[in-house]
Image (cartoon, rainbow, N blue to C red):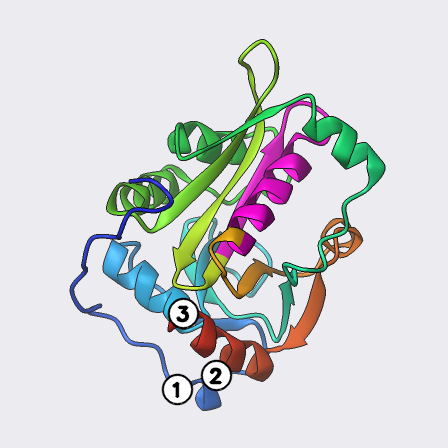
Amino acid sequence: MNWDSTPSPLGESVWEFPPSTKWPRNDVVGRGADLSPETLIHAYRHGVFPMVSGDEFDDQQATDLIWWSPQQRAVIPIDQLIVTRSMRRSARKFEVRIDTCFEMVIRGCASPNRDHGWITTEFIEAYVKLHELGYAHSFEVFNESGLLAGGLYGVRLGGLFAGESMFHLLRDASKVALMALVAKMKQSEMKMLDVQWMTPHLQSLGAVAVQREQYLQQLAVAVSQ
């Protein structure tokens, strides 16, 4: 499924999250459940995303599935992406494609050489399935030799793009993918680019932190687009 395809309809999730008013005052909303398409899309619609966690909280093992909704949510306003001259120069050196090699991108993001890796085989299979159903998308950056130099992937729901991860093998390749994503979102008149947690790198690209309650209000508008 490509960017402009209509996603396949899904059934109801067998899992339910508590109302946001009853969420704990930390970033963890729940534990367990599964990575079925119905569960994942239900979660994203409610401002929740999954990751595995080994030692960040309590004594959880690396395979424990945890559902997160950060109290300080990082978003990149799509009209405020910071594009440097270096990024513009790099963009001229690469070719960007959309949804031509989704699994290669997510496997690039899941490289075992990356610190704090959390993308397991189960996550790869789950998000490849979401891609096949038309919900998950990848932006892929190739160099002049046809090498996949970097990219990003995430989930699109209405006017929301929930960015999951990005990677690069060549300098600025992931930033070029982000530039292409933002351009495509503007073309599609989308409203929200969610990048989960704030980092210095994301802040340098224009990300801002919003309170969870504010994020959920904006999310409701975006996914209904």
Three-letter amino acid code at the position of disc 3: Val
Specify the quadrant of the image occupied by residue 178. Answer: top right
204 falls in the magenta region:
no
* Residue where numbered disc 3 is placed: 223
185 falls in the magenta region:
yes
Three-letter amino acid code at the position of disc 1: Pro
- In space, the residues marked 3 and 1 are separated at their CA atoms by 18 Å
- In space, the residues marked 3 and 2 are separated at their CA atoms by 21 Å
In this view, the residue in front, 134 or 108, is: 134
Which element is circle 3 on? helix
Which element is circle 2 on? loop
**Residue drawn where x is 24% and y is 61% of the image:** 38
* Residue where numbered disc 2 is placed: 23
2 vs 1, front mark: 1
Residue 33 visible in the shown view:
no
Residues under numbered marks 3 and 2 in contact, where contact means CB atoms less than 8 Å apart: no
**Left-right relation of 173 to 147:** right
**Left-right relation of 70 to 64:** right
* Residue where numbered disc 1 is placed: 19
Q: Position of residue 155 (x, y in %)?
A: 42, 53
Q: Which residue occupies the extreme top position in the image?
A: 145
State which tag comes first along the sequence, 3 or 2. 2
**Residue drawn where x is 55% and y is 15% of the image:** 147
